[in-house]
Image (cartoon, helix red, strand yellow):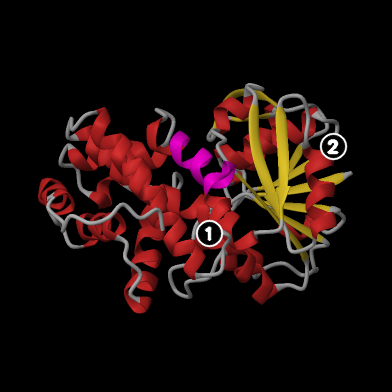
Amino acid sequence: MKIGVVGAGSWGSAFGLYLAGLGYDVTFWAREVEVVDSINRSKVNELFLPGFRFPEWVRAVYDINELNDCEVLVNAVPVQFIRGVYSFLKFKPRVIVNLSKGIEIQTGMRVSEIFGSMFDSRYVVISGPSFAKEVAKGKPTACVTASLDGELARRISKIFSSNRFRLYYSDDVVGVELGGSLKNIIAIACGISDGLGLGLNARAALINRGLVEMARFGSFLGAKRETFFGLSGLGDLVLTATGDLSRNRRFGIELAKGKRKEDLLSERYVVEGVFTTQAVYSIATKFSIDMPITTEVYKILFLDKDPRESLEELMGREIKYESLF
């Protein structure tokens, strides 16, 4: 099977390395000339995944249309750049398997909606607790696929699974996509809490109440509530909110130390939670969805609110019955 991986950042590179290890014919597309040259010359992505060697048959291209003979396109382009990248495509992808997590700021669309507005292609999303370096190292990982085409979700789960990477399947595209997106907001909040030295109790509370926010927001938009207690919800949330490899958590820690958001953001290493916070806050405000943690993260990121003041407001909210949704 020929597979094109669109986007050769750390996650796209790690997943492509895994697929090549299963014996698939993998071709990467990258916008960075140095990445294409590095993969073709030394079979290593020195910029985003140094120390890991691709099999000899793996190659990289700079023209995305060279992927036109691929049976599957795996998308690893950050959400805010998807339209720009795929606007150059001169063919219709047969199957799109999406790895990216987030919501488009300009439209409020999930990734399936973005691709749906551009192509009439079959679509699957893969999401769950999966740090790129651990997947590249062959550490045990479990995720979930979701598609409106149940047979396609099962097929992708079967052909992409191994004794190192287990894929469950689901028909809840909305829930799986939102779980992977919303957990980044909570991970930033947990990073801020950890950076302020507020302790493990505070982190646990943020994870728990953050999960409630995720389920509340998702169910309002048509997701199944139980999806948020699965791999793409709770599973990914726990990993991203506590793991040292979490880009969103590290971002929150640095914010708590007084660093400016603008100085922490990099074009090459995208912190999706920043964009997602902006998009989710806009939707929650429009439809009056109660999202206290998201609201405070938004105010810290975009209104320069002091994180300690946000903590005081969260802890000082009206005492109420514990609701799980």
| Residue, far front | 321
Residue indicated by mark 2? 24
Figure quadrant of the N terminus: top right
Residue located 83% across and 59% down the image? 68
Q: Nearer the viewer, residue 65 or 41?
A: 65
Q: How many neighbours does mark 1 have within 10 angstroms: few (below 14), some (14-19), or many (20 or more)? A: many
Q: Quadrant of the C terminus?
A: bottom left
- Secondary structure at badge 1 equals helix
Q: Would residue 20 appear left or right of 182 to someone viewing this image?
A: right
Q: Position of residue 245 (x, y in %)?
A: 44, 30
What secondary structure predominates along the stretch shown in magenta?
Answer: helix
Q: Verify whether residue 235 appears in magenta.
A: yes
Is residue 303 visible to us here? Answer: yes
- The residues colored magenta run 229-239
Q: Residue at x 48, y 54 (%)?
A: 181
Q: Nearer the viewer, residue 86 or 286?
A: 286
Which residue: 39% across, 65% down? 280
Left of 5 or right of it: where is 315? left
Query: Which residue is disc 1 drawn over?
Result: 79
Contact flag, marks 1 and 2 (Cβ < 8 Å): no
Q: Where residue 35 appears, x then y in whole percent?
A: 60, 40
Please determine whether, in this image, residue 119 is positioned above or below residue 304. below
**Residue 237, quarter of picture:** top left
SS type, badge 2: loop
Residue 271 in view of the camera: no
Specify the amino acid type for callout 2: Tyr
Toward which corner of the image does residue 56 lie, by quadrant?
top right
Q: Which mark is residue 322?
A: none
How far across and down, in percent of the image, does residue 151 sit? 85, 56
